[in-house]
Amino acid sequence: MSAGSPVATDVLIIGAGAAGLMCALTAAQRGRTVVLLDHNNKLAEKIRISGGGRCNFTNLNVKPDNYLSYNPHFCRSALARFTPQHFISLLEKHGIRYHEKTLGQLFCDDGSEAIIDMLRSECDAAGVRWAMPCTVGQITHGEGFSVQTSHGLYRTSSLVVATGGLSIPKIGATPFGYKVAEQFNLPVTKLKPGLVPLSFHPEAWAVYADLSGVSLDAIVGFGKQSFRENLLFTHRGLSGPAILQISSYWEPGQPLSIDLLPDHDLYAIFMEQRTNKMLLANFLTQYLPKRLAEIIATHWSENLPVNQHSSKQLAALADKIKGWQITPSGTLGYGKAEVTCGGVDTRALSSKSMECNDVAGLYFIGEVVDVTGHLGGYNFQWAWASGHAAGLAA
């Protein structure tokens, strides 16, 4: 394409990830001409690597409560109009098999590649044009939008930004979408890594570093929010689903509260067993992983027989095991985060169409928007739903 011949299209979408693909196929099926640009030469890398390559593409239990946003009601409209069942119907149309894991999470039997192929073929069938790899330069706005790219100049009346967040930079994450928002004077809320392991100062963690690889069912809480799932000790800190979930809520400098024995009233057990002559570590091993029981017995108490501890000591130990207060030093950052918390402020967008209230024809969808889902397929459902909402409007 020569620089002198602008290409006109009804809808220009920047970012060929989950939200961009859904928006493209939805708009093209309405008869709109659509061009989909991406700086990567590989399509939808985040879909490809998600769920260990099996793509946890949605969750059967999706509801607005599963999302964080400064405006928690913003996601309602899009999620109500494109549900998990709509996406499942698309999979069934293409004969793609899937299975449910715990807590309503749906995974693809044939690997995430099957979902990418499905979205690509839906786009192709609807006439979407591709420009990949393609870098985007200047965007100007007058009558519609002019977008200068490495493929030449595009003109469009509807520009959709679907460029994702800052998480997983090794597959191409950039702050591009936030810069476009800034150019058009749209507020962006505070950004931080979400669904990310938590780290501790090496000295503070030295006692627990040997527990690397130990996991257990726990309740992890911060403020009014708590999650009950697996918790995993690592050499640098804590991970596992319960920690990833709470990390999106956690604020630096604040302690987490962890119940290491959710199904037991440990105080009652200790009071019943006050005369037990078993060493504390051996006693706790009946309820907790052996290495953890040993560390608790030696570092949180004295590893004496249970009957040599006073009721007061046993009560204090029960309280600590049921409500361990521990303050992370930080997170493992965007490199290990599954999502970016924060984004384009939803107050600047229409919840029905994802269009900017003050800039006609400009849309933001997916992770670049200040809507962050819990772990377990919720972020993909937001991508499908927000992409579909913009695709119906653009």
Image (cartoon, grey):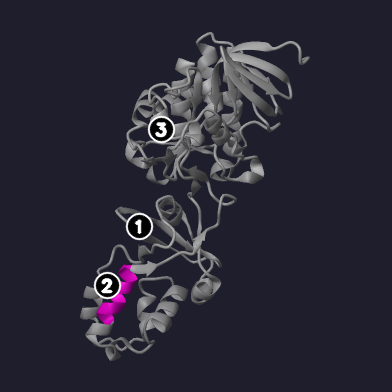
Residues 267 and 73: in front is 73
Q: Which residue, given by chain and number where applicable, does mark 3 sit on?
A: 346
Q: Which mark is residue 274?
A: none
**Residue name at image x 29 percent, y 91 percent:** 308
Looking at the picture, which amino acid does disc 2 mark? Leu
Marks 1 and 2 sit apart, C-alpha to C-alpha, by: 22 Å
Pinpoint residue 386: horizontal percent, then vertical percent. Answer: 45, 27
Q: Main secondary structure of the magenta part?
A: helix
Circle 1 packing at 10 Å, graded few (<14), some (14-19), many (20+), is some
Quadrant location of residue 222?
A: bottom left
Q: Dot 1: what SS? A: strand
Pinpoint residue 229: horizontal percent, then vertical percent. Answer: 39, 55
Q: Which residue, given by chain and number where applicable, does mark 1 sit on?
A: 222
Q: Dot 3: what SS? A: helix
Residue 193 located within the stretch drawn in magenta: no
Report the magenta residues as a range.
Answer: 314-323
